[in-house]
Image (cartoon, helix red, strand yellow):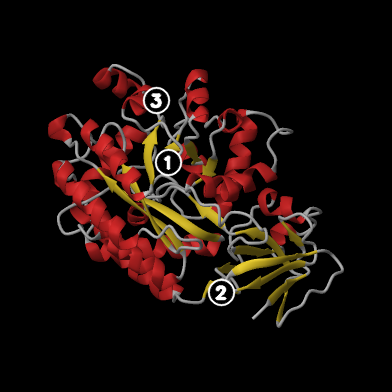
């Protein structure tokens, strides 16, 4: 069946004023204004502003259970982590983790996300099958996902930050990485599940684990992800423990290549930006979390100019406190205008980071853009709310007037959100069940 998504109010694609034609889960034609293509069915998009499906490249979904937690508010990264690690260690059990993943995936999709990447690194006893839980929840909802088999192997007794009860040893981690890759990593065009290997950060894993993880990624042709350069504390930690700055350490580990994308990437000097760009290392910009934790300003323009793909992520729902990427697009515009200026950072930059840039971070060339041959993944918004009244430029209005939910979401040619509600999820039931699961995390204070 050829579906013509007809005459959108606006669309983020050149030469598609008349819409797009979808067939077999892919975009098969861009329609110029005034043209009428061959089609079997029509969807009237005259009320909709159409974007490529948004792509979230960094999150910690288990943290939806500790949003605005009294023990952690008004803190910067390291004290924030020290406050929350013991609470997570005692309470992130399989059922709670499933509810956290289900809610975060649903929330992301309702904001316009069609592909998500979650960096899960917390493995208390009983949660060994975390990746299987997330794979099941992504399939249930019908959203594309990159499962990040994260890891921590340095605990407090080793000089790291996390409690002993939530880390695993290197051999256990690497064995499960191989298992997850073998079960879920699909590199074919249009795949719904892929796997990335994601040691948490330099202060939570061994050097051996970083080196062996990259070897495994090369064997299985998958991407690698880690936190880097998020705070000054991290730079100080690396200097104290490794005798070098984080980027130097990354290079020493063999992680300077285009298989890698980093979370945050804030505190890089000019030389480090140039080196990261030369090797094509991606950076996921997390504007909301960076502002909440006062971590700093990502050097997006310099990184892109040097050759690094820049993507966008909501980051964890205890440092962002929601999972809404279209709001993150607005925050990216605002903080980057403070970093640079109002003329050189536009809504098109923020859209690019959330779509094409994010796709490049995940090493995917089949998503992230409205073009013939790409997957039919769309986020479609209306301008019916009061906040949009009077807006002259529909695309700019999504960002400047503060869009926060998609009216329609299509993934691989199928509607997954209709009339601002997911077709495969009871949102009221989800809200209740997740809220009940979260009560245990408050009682843990």
Mark 1, residue position: 259
Q: Quadrant of the N terminus?
A: bottom right
Tell me the mark number nearer the camera, choosing from 2 and 1: 1
Q: CA distance from mark 2 to mark 1?
A: 30 Å
Side of 163 relative to 405 (left or right): left
- Kind of element beneath mark 2: strand
The residue sitting at the bottom extreme is 40
Can you give x and y, in whole percent of width and height, for residue 239 in the image? 31, 18
Q: Nearer the viewer, residue 295 or 7?
A: 7
Mark 3, residue position: 247
- Kind of element beneath mark 1: loop
Mark 2, residue position: 414
Q: Earlier in the sequence, mark 2 or mark 1?
A: 1
Can you give x and y, in whole percent of width and height, for residue 162 in the image? 21, 39
Instruction: Categorize mark 1 by other alpha carbons within 10 Å: few (<14), some (14-19), many (20+).
Output: many
Can you give x and y, in whole percent of width and height, for residue 196 in the image? 36, 49
Q: Residue at x 33, y 70 (%)?
A: 433
């Amino acid at each position: 069946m050829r579906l013509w998504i007809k005459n959108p109010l606006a669309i983020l694609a050149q030469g598609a004023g008349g819409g797009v034609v979808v067939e077999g889960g892919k975009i098969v034609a861009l329609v110029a204004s005034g043209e009428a293509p061959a089609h079997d069915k029509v969807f009237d998009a005259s009320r909709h502003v159409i974007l490529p499906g948004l792509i979230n490249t960094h999150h910690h979904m288990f943290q939806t259970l500790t949003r605005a937690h009294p023990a952690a508010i008004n803190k910067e990264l390291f004290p924030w982590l020290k406050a929350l690690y013991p609470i997570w260690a005692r309470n992130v059990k399989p059922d709670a983790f499933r509810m956290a993943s289900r809610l975060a995936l649903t929330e992301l999709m309702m904001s316009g996300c069609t592909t998500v990447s979650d960096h899960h690194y917390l493995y208390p006893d009983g949660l060994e099958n975390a990746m299987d839980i997330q794979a099941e929840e992504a399939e249930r909802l019908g959203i594309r996902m990159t499962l990040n088999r994260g890891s921590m192997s340095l605990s407090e007794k080793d000089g790291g930050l996390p409690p002993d009860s939530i880390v695993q040893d290197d051999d256990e981690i690497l064995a499960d990485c191989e298992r997850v890759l073998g079960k879920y990593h699909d590199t074919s065009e249009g795949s719904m599940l892929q796997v990335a290997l994601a040691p948490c950060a330099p202060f939570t894993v061994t050097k051996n684990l970083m080196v062996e993880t990259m070897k495994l990624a090369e064997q299985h042709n998958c991407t690698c992800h880690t936190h880097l350069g998020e705070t000054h504390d991290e730079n100080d930690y690396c200097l104290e423990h490794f005798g070098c700055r984080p980027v130097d350490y990354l290079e020493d580990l063999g992680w300077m290549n285009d298989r890698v994308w980093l979370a945050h990437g804030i505190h890089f000097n000019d030389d480090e930006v140039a080196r990261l760009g030369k090797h094509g290392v991606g950076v996921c910009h997390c504007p909301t979390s960076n502002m909440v934790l006062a971590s700093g300003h990502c050097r997006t323009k310099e990184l892109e100019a040097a050759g690094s793909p820049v993507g966008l992520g909501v980051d964890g729902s205890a440092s962002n406190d929601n999972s809404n990427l279209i709001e993150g697009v607005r925050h990216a515009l605002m903080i980057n205008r403070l970093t640079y200026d109002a003329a050189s950072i536009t809504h098109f930059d923020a859209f690019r980071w959330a779509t094409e840039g994010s796709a490049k971070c995940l090493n995917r060339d089949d998503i992230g853009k409205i073009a013939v041959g790409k997957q039919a993944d769309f986020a479609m918004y209306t301008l019916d709310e009061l906040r949009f009244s009077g807006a002259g430029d529909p695309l700019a209005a999504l960002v400047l007037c503060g869009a926060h939910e998609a009216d329609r979401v299509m993934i691989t040619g199928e509607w997954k959100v209709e009339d601002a509600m997911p077709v495969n999820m009871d949102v009221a039931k989800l809200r209740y069940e997740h809220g009940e699961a979260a009560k245990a995390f408050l009682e843990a204070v």
